[in-house]
Amino acid sequence: MCFWAEALSVATYLKNRSPTSCFSGQTPYERWWNVKPDISNLKVFGCVSYAHVPREKRKKLDKKTTKCIFIGYPDNSKGFKLYDPAKKVMFRSRDVNFDERKFWGDFKPSNDPEELIDETWVHGVIGDEDEEDERVTEEDARGDENEGIDDNQSDEGNQSPPQLRRERRAPIRYGEPIPTEYASVASLDFDDEPKSIEEAMEDENAVHWKKACDDEIASLAKNETWDLVQLPKGKSTVGCKWVLKKKRGANGEVNRYKARLVAQGFTQRKGIDYREVFSPVVRYSSIRTLLAIANQYDMKIHQMDVISAYLNGVLDEEIYMKQPPGYIDPRYPTKVCRLRKSLYGLKQSARCWNASFDKYLKSEGYLSCPTDFCVYLKTIGESIIILIALFVDDTIIICNNAGVLKEVKQKLNYRYEMQDQGRIHYFLGMSVKRDRANKTLTIDQSLYIEKVLQRFGMRDCNPISTPLENGKKFNRLIENESPVDVTDYQAAIGSLIYAAISTRPDISVAVGLLSQFMTNPGKEHWNGVKRILRYLKGTLHFGLSFKHSENFVLEGYSDADWAGDELTRKSMSGYIFQLGGSPISWASKKQTVVALSTTEAEYIALSLATQEAVWLRNLLRDIHLKPTTTSIFEDNQGAISLSMNPFSHARTKHIDIKYHYIRDLISKKEIDVKYCPTTEMVADIFTKGLPKTTFEQLRTKMGVLNV
């Protein structure tokens, strides 16, 4: 039997909707929600079902239904959970017909039922155009427990958090598995952390792990994170577990052993255990902008790490947690922890911490920038300026006075327990190198990229000169073509996206094109991913270069590839902005409408670039810089004419008014659109695959160099 987990889930679902004498004939669902459950959706488990296939997912002569097996009810959404024996995938659908007289054993595809056990989950909604397939993964904090009330009451509008199912795979550190059909290694050199405190105590580094856990418990006690109390009647507890990591430097060496006690917040209920959870972080564009400014004006750049940052947030809700594994108080083994401060793993922890840090900085006279709430500014007199950027618990401090910088760090360390890491060198996985004598600064992710290559078995691959073949277009998976593993593909794309948005704009368009096939990738798409990895192998030490400039102004480039998407005939927009020649912001995006001409496509791309220019100009104003008119270079004369002359033409009268936003900015002299020859159009690299010579020239021009 392959569906024991699903059978148990359905049994629980039915049990919660069945009357019981304990509640005087009421159902557990009614007792909890004060609403009678709707049981009109109940079907016989394991019966044959026929899921409707939407028009956009089938060809003219394809079948309109898929024969499946009914295996349950999805969490937090209406519909039914189904299994397709032919494709060996699980999905959900709202548009289903059932034959409750026939059962799944009638069309088992193999004599060996164990073939099905290693299959992964693919959750998609058939019959709903607005919902895409989504991968079901398990949070790191979940551990090996399944606690709390059954959360399958989706049809009646429950408010419980989704209970995600565990993937039926062998556990692999860092979440996603390695594509074994292409990989030559099974694990990373860096992925050697224990998965539990019991395993840590048997590890060769047990002494270090024990000290790390002791330090964490001491920090929690010092911060008065909880009180030991008897669990009040009617209250439930959340679990907790240890997360153990080795903190490494830019070269991969182990700097320290870190233990973190994490609450298993997946059992929290919205409206009862938490309310709002959103917490801002500094944008990568803001980080690069601040670094460019600091390098230009020879300001000092230091970084600090807040130790146990989340423990500084004060909880408004009443939450009880089990005592930590390995540290249960022998005097009060039956008591639980009444949380007073936020803890890692709780859904509202990040918000509580951010509110605490924001309140403190504002009490010290700092101003939060309206354009980026995690960038703070303080001026002393007319000559001293302090800039602080916060990304969760990592902070960048920029100042033009050494004495003031030292004082700021001392105050922060007094208010919060922080680790002073000195001059910035390794921040958010990015290696930062600075040569103040030559007024240069570089950012690269060579260590991260090397780990990605090793993770996907491409460490010894042959390098290639471009990430995307010239003129290459990708198509959907054709009929009868075997898909590649969705989890592996999504893991690879996710890893590449992080590099593309941080320090490697040269792979943006390739990653963007391949990310459109996340739900159903084929071998062609996987080969595209491997080409990007091969390109990164050959440019491992490339990164962003920031130099001092005599013309420190904001400039941008905008371009479009008309009807570049052969599936939808939509165009691809691309832009990049440089501050004094240093790259600070870029994007490669598919347009949301179909453009009828190259001029229209370029005009829409120009509008997108203009929006980013306005944001960057506002950021510069917030940190007391006065930007001059921002030049955006464009290689289409028609788009330039359309942006400067508000005339109506038969070929342009249909263009949405929102794209004419640029005209107002030009009239205010905030934006100036200038012509640029196509051969010098840097943004061309964000719209399509280019020949090697052209690609390398534009890559150098936008500031991606061997650092």
Image (cartoon, rainbow, N blue to C red):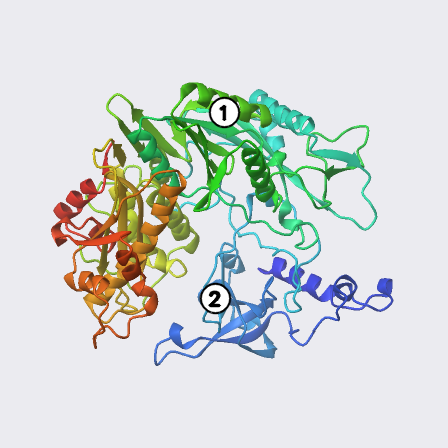
Quadrant showing the N terminus: bottom right
- What residue sits right under mark 2 in the picture? 131
Q: Is residue 228 above or below residue 317?
A: above
**Residue 100 falls left or right of residue 690:** right
Q: Is residue 279 above or below residue 476?
A: above
How crowded is the residue under tag 2: few (<14 C-alpha within 10 Å), some, or many (20+)? few
Question: Residue 49: x, y in percent?
Answer: 55, 75
Quadrant showing the C terminus: top left
Question: Residue 564: x, y in percent?
Answer: 24, 63
For the residue pair 390 and 369, the one nearer the viewer reads as 369
Mark drawn on residue 408: 1
Circle 1 SS class:
helix
- At label 1, the amino acid type is Val
For the residue pair 214 and 187, the one nearer the viewer reads as 214
Quadrant of the rendered image containing residue 45: bottom right
Residue at point 44%, 52% (across, down):
487
Question: Residue 346: x, y in percent?
Answer: 62, 44
Question: Residue 273: x, y in percent?
Answer: 69, 50
- At label 2, the amino acid type is Glu
For the residue pair 129 and 531, the one nearer the viewer reads as 129
Mark drawn on residue 627: none
Quadrant of the rendered image containing residue 364: top right
Circle 2 SS class:
loop
